[in-house]
Image (cartoon, rainbow, N blue to C red):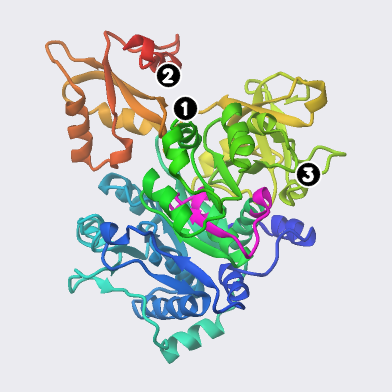
Amino acid sequence: MQTTPQQRIDEFTQAGWWGEESLYDFFLAAAKRPDHLALVDPANRSAITDGEPQRFNYKQLGKCIDFLSDLFFQGGIRENDKVVVQLPNIVELPITYLALARLGAILSPVPVQYGPHELNQTIEKLSPEAFVTLSNFKSKNLAESHGQIFTNQCPVFSFGDQITTDRIPLNLGQHKPSSAWQAYVSERTPSANDVLTICWTSGTTGSPKGVPRSHNNWLVSGISSLDATKMTQDDILLNPFPMVNMAGIGGFLFPWLLSGNTLVLHHPFELKLFLQQIADEKISYSVAAPAVLNMLLKEPEIMSAADLSSLRAIGSGGAPLTEWMVASFQDDYNIPVANLFGSNEGMCMSSNIDDLPCPADRAIYFPRYGLEGIRWSSRVSKMTKTRLVDIDTGVEILSPGKAGELEIYGPSIFDGYWESAQDNALVFSDDGYFRTGDVFEISDDPTKSMFYKFVGRSKDIIVRGGMNISPDEIDKLLAGHPKLAAAAVTGFDDEVLGEKIGAVVVAKPGESIVLGDLTDYLREIGLAVFKLPEKIRVVAELPMNATGKILRRELKSLFDEESL
């Protein structure tokens, strides 16, 4: 299946930015070092799911991929089938990517935290042909509880030791696959322009949107990550982000295979284990949220006990970086921090030590990709055009210091949301630029006019621990609470997760309400736990403008420390 118009395929192929290699082709190139360590389980695997931590070299990994691909084939999965995958960061997840890619199936990965509410939305929008999960995730049998949601829609495949007869069992064998599978994959003619994934992103409408991306789209995102930190085949990567979106796929899955190095997995994020893995596995590159890096520097006892000697670089993003944090890691620990800015739709910008050697500058500036006469270190900068436009008028901004929405065009950008013509008309300009919803300004320092400075988000998205959450989605659910006359949620600052969710509510006359009333209600609906409010404010009325729109900035002020 392809969603890219032929005109775009021709444009980016003729420019040399898109090629003919698929995800599995990148694995084959990496596997030319068959004995090199390829993939490592989280050290705490046995606390997450069945089995002890596993380690595979590229030769062993290839056998696992083929064997698992054959199991999917025997279960009926074929080219263009849409497969929802809900797995934690264990070795089965990247192997599932590669095994399904061999068949030409389309993966739709969802966070393991998703509950019935989100999964039902996925089914409604996607109509999948299969669901892949596991029978034990932290003692929860997702193959049963979540599998029931898919039973009337499609077959359910499951890893694990507690699989019932109506589920299709999966495992990572090393046996030779069937002749029928071998004939099928040998006769396929895959294209790098085929859709590889449909990931999910939260929109301000409250409805999740599918983001189809081809092998070539992901290739460019992977190149962006490679260049941000000069990744090589000798690196050992530690991925702490769920491999379900840009951070996990574009930041680790593709760079891992493009460079043919070692990928170590981490799940869920736990600081002590994260630091221990860096020491034990001799990690040379990882990524962490700004709040985590800030917290580390404020805990000298933790930093002094941590062995970071193998770490040559670290990436961070998802929220603004502080100048002192980037400077401290570089000056005190000789670890440069790359400032990464991306989205599921394919936006890829980075500030690295080559383009911005001063750490304080790297924390706040991003190169203006596409600016004539300027050469940047990232190959993606040569492929990408960006501009700022006035949010109200749409007129391009060329003056320093004036805030505008960033628009971007290039081979990493998706073609449009899955079956969402109305949304696509809003997020693309007439000449094909993607409207990111992020607000930047051109630096007003005359010596730095070739850089953007991040200002904020024009959308109301809450970013909790790297996961995007639509406040409208939760608002709509709370509207049905029997004790509430009105409700709205907002993000409030958190040192570890960046943001958490706070609910501002108006109780019905004669009713009293506490936080537990909200969370119990949302749990019963099946909302994912990471979307639950963690603080509540009860008010007489919600702040609104003259047209009745909720003023979320005023909501957020209710959760400032000074107001507690």
Give the residue displayed 24% in from the left and 54% down from the top: 138
Q: Which contiguous range is marked in magenta?
A: 226-249
Q: Secondary structure at mark 2?
A: helix
Residue 200 x, y percent position in the rendering: 45, 48
Residue 271 x, y percent position in the rendering: 39, 44
State which quadrant residue 222 falls in. bottom right
Residue where numbered disc 2 is placed: 552
Q: Is residue 550 magenta?
A: no
Residue 152 x, y percent position in the rendering: 24, 62
Q: Are marks 1 and 2 in contact (CB under 8 Å)?
A: yes
Up the image or down, 314 lies above or below 205; here it is below
Name the residue type under label 1: Asp
Q: Are marks 3 and 2 in contact (CB under 8 Å)?
A: no
Quarter of the image with the N terminus in it: bottom right
Give the residue displayed 78% in from the left and 48% down from the top: 382
Q: CA distance from mark 1 to mark 3?
A: 32 Å
Please say whether residue 270 is visible from this viewpoint.
no
